[in-house]
Image (tube, rainbow, N blue to C red):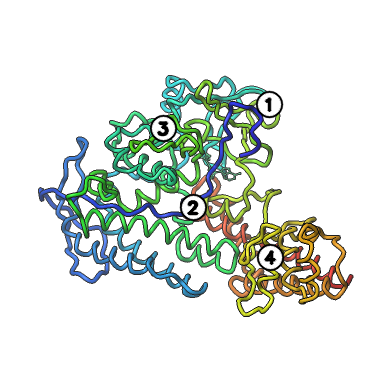
Amino acid sequence: MGKNKRKNKQQQQQSPSLVQTPTQTQSEAASGSASGTTSASGSAAGNQTSESHIVQDKNKIDGKRFPSLSGRRGELNALVVRLLELVAMQPANPNEEWKQYVELQLQLQRIMVLEEPLQKAVCLDATDDQSRQAKVTAFSEWAKAGGVKTDCLEIAIFPGYQLGLRATQDIAAEQPVLSVPRTLIFSEEHLPETDRKLFCNFPLLTNFNLAYALVIEKVRGPDSVWRPYIDVLPARYNTVLYFSIEQMQRLRGTAACTSALRQCRVIARQYANMYKCAHIRPDASSASSMGVLFTQHGLCYELYRWAVSTVMTRQNLVPRELQANDDGDDLSQLPISALIPYWDMANHRPGKITSYYDSGVHQMDCTAQEACKAGEQFFIYYGDRSNADLLVHNGFIDVNNRKDYVKIRLGLGLSDALVEQRAKILARLNIERKAELRVLPAPDYISGELLAFVRVFNMSADQLEHWGSDLERAVDLLHIDCALETDHETRTWQYLYQRLKLLLGVLEATFKESDELQQLEKIQLTEKQEVNKELPGQEIDLLVVQYRRLERRILTDALEYAQERCKV
Ligand SMILES: C[S@@+](CC[C@H](N)C(=O)[O-])C[C@H]1O[C@@H](n2cnc3c(N)ncnc32)[C@H](O)[C@@H]1O
C-alpha cells in the first residue's frame, strides 16, 4: 500500500486475490448418528435420488451441534462430483468459459439449497447495516480492552459504503489516528497448534490459511474470543462470488470478466476439493486434512464464500511472529495475511498509504492521509488498483480512480518467422511474449509497455535487425516521441486503433451503451424512491454498470487518441 518510509516499519499490503488452490490433502471420515428430522427447504437436482427430509444427524463438535445432512448426502456428493468434473476442464475460449461458469453456478445453487440446514446452523444470518451498527458498541469496547487506541475515530454507517470510520474531532493531515496491537490482529497464528498443523501447511497460501482460520472462529460462535469482531463483519459481500448469473452476464465483454469467472471457478474448485476429502474420498489414516473443515467445522459453500470474501475485501499482509514452521523452514521473509479489527472499518479514497506495521512495538499504526473535519468520514488509501481489480477482489470500484487502466492481452504469433527477434527486444523491456498490457485513462491513453509491444510487433525484418543490434536503445520504444520511420509509426497506431475498436465492439455487442444508460437511470430512480431501503442485488447492479461505463470511457478516449495519431 505505498512506500516504506521508516526503517523498522513494514509496509501494509492488500494482497490482491485468492487465486490458487491449496494442495489437496486427505480427510477424516465424517461421523455422526441420526437423531431427528426437519423438512427440506428446497429441491435439488442430482444424479441420485433426493430425499424429501433431512436426518438431523447431529455431530457434537466444539460443544455445538451441526446437521450432518446425511439424508441429502448422496445428492450432494453427486453435485460435487459434477462440480469437480467441470472445474477440471480448462475453457478454450470466452464462450466455453461462460458456459462453464453458468453450469458451475447452477450446481452451486443446488448445493446451497441442500446445505441450507447447515448454513443456518453456522449462523450466517442476513445482517444489514443497522444490525451491524447495533453490535458496534460491544465491538468497540472489545477492541479498546484489547489495546486498540484511537481518540478521534468511531464507527458509523455511511450510505454507499456500509460501515466506515467517522472523525469525532478535527484531524490534521499526518496526525496519528489509530493503532492496533498485534494481539488483536487476526491471522492463522491465532489458531491452536493442532488446527494450525492441520490447515496452515502452505505458508505461501497465507490468504487461504486466513480464510480457514476465520471459518473455524466463526463456527465457534460465542466460544470464540473473536466473536465481537466477527459479529460486526458483513454477512454478505459484493464480490463476484455473490453475483447472480444475470449480473455476471452484464460483465461479459469487459476486461474484468475473465478474472471474475476465474475467481468463481477457483473458489468452487477449492470448496469441491475439500468436500471430496471430507465426504467422497475420506482417508481416515491421514491426520492432515482440509476435509476436517467440513466434518468438524460445519463448512458449507455459503460459509466458504463468506470467509473467502471477508479475506479478499479486508486482508492485509503483516510480518510473521512465528518465523519458522515445524520442519524448521525459515518463514521470516514471508508475510502473513491478517485481518486488522477496527482499522479494517476504514473505507478507501485516493491518496497515499499511511498505515504501517511497526515491528519494534508489534502494532499497526495509521496516520491521516489528509485533514478531516469532525463528523466527516475518515478514509485510507488501499493502494494502486485498477477498477477491474477492485471490482473482482474488493467488491467496489472507485469512480475517481487515478490509477485505473483496462488490461488488453497481446501475444506474438507462433507462426511469425521473426518471433525470436521480436521476443529478444521485448525481453529487454521486461515484456513477455504473451502479455497483459494497459490502456490508460486520459491524458495518457496508451501505456509505454503497450506502445512498445505494438511497435515491436509491427517491425519489419530490417527494423528488428536495427533495434536488436543495440538493445540498450530499446527503452526508447517505451516513449511516445521515440523516433521511428513514419510507416512503422502509422502501422503501430493503426493496429492500436483496430484493436481498441474491436474491444469496444465486443463491449457494445454484449450490452449496448443505450441499455447501460437505461439501467443506470432505473437504478438511480429506485434508489431515490426507496431511500434507506436495501434492495437485494442493487449494489451489484450499480457496480457492474458503473464499471462498464468507466471501461468504455477509457477505451473510447484511447480510440480517439489513436485515431488522431494515425493522422500524424
Ligand atoms: C476494509 S472494508 C471497509 C469497511 C466496510 N465498509 C464495512 O462495512 O465493513 C472494505 C469494503 O468496504 C467497502 N468500500 C471501501 N471503500 C469503498 C469505496 N470507496 N466505495 C464503496 N465501497 C467501499 C467495500 O465493500 C470494500 O470491500
Mark closer to the chain start, 1 or 3: 1
Q: Gap in Å between the C-alphas at discs 1 and 3? A: 27 Å
Which element type, helix, strand or loop, lies under badge 3?
helix
Query: Can you give x and y, in whole percent of width and height, for residue 317 in the image?
Result: 51, 38
Within 10 angstroms of label 2, few (less than 14), some, or many (20 or more) residues?
many
Relative to residue 364, is residue 415 depicted above or below?
below
- Label drawn at residue 229: 3
Decide if residue 225 is on the left or right side of residue 446. left
Asked whether the beta carbons under mark 1 and mark 4 sit within 8 Å of each other, the answer is no
Marked residue nearer the N-terminal end (1 or 4): 1
Q: Earlier in the sequence, mark 2 or mark 3?
A: 3
Name the residue tied to disc 4: 424
Q: Earlier in the sequence, mark 3 or mark 4?
A: 3
| Circle 2 residue | 239
In this rendered view, identify the residue nearer to me: 444 or 143.
444
Mark 1, residues whose alpha carbon is within 10 Å: few (<14), some, or many (≥20)? few
Amino acid type, label 4? Lys
In the displayed structure, 8 sits above or below 13; it is above
In primary-sequence order, the first of circles 2 and 1 is: 1
Picture disc at residue 174: 1
The answer to whether residue 518 is seen in the rendering is no
Residue at the spot x=34%, y=55% of the render? 271
Identity of the amino acid at label 1?
Glu
As drawn, is 168 to the left or to the right of 534? right
346 shown above or below 308 = above
Q: Position of residue 212 (x, y in %)?
A: 35, 44
Position of residue 236 measured from the top left corner of the image (x, y, whole percent): 43, 48
Which quarter of the image is occupied by the C terminus? bottom right
Q: CA distance from mark 2 to mark 4?
A: 40 Å
For marks 2 and 1, give the CA distance.
Answer: 32 Å
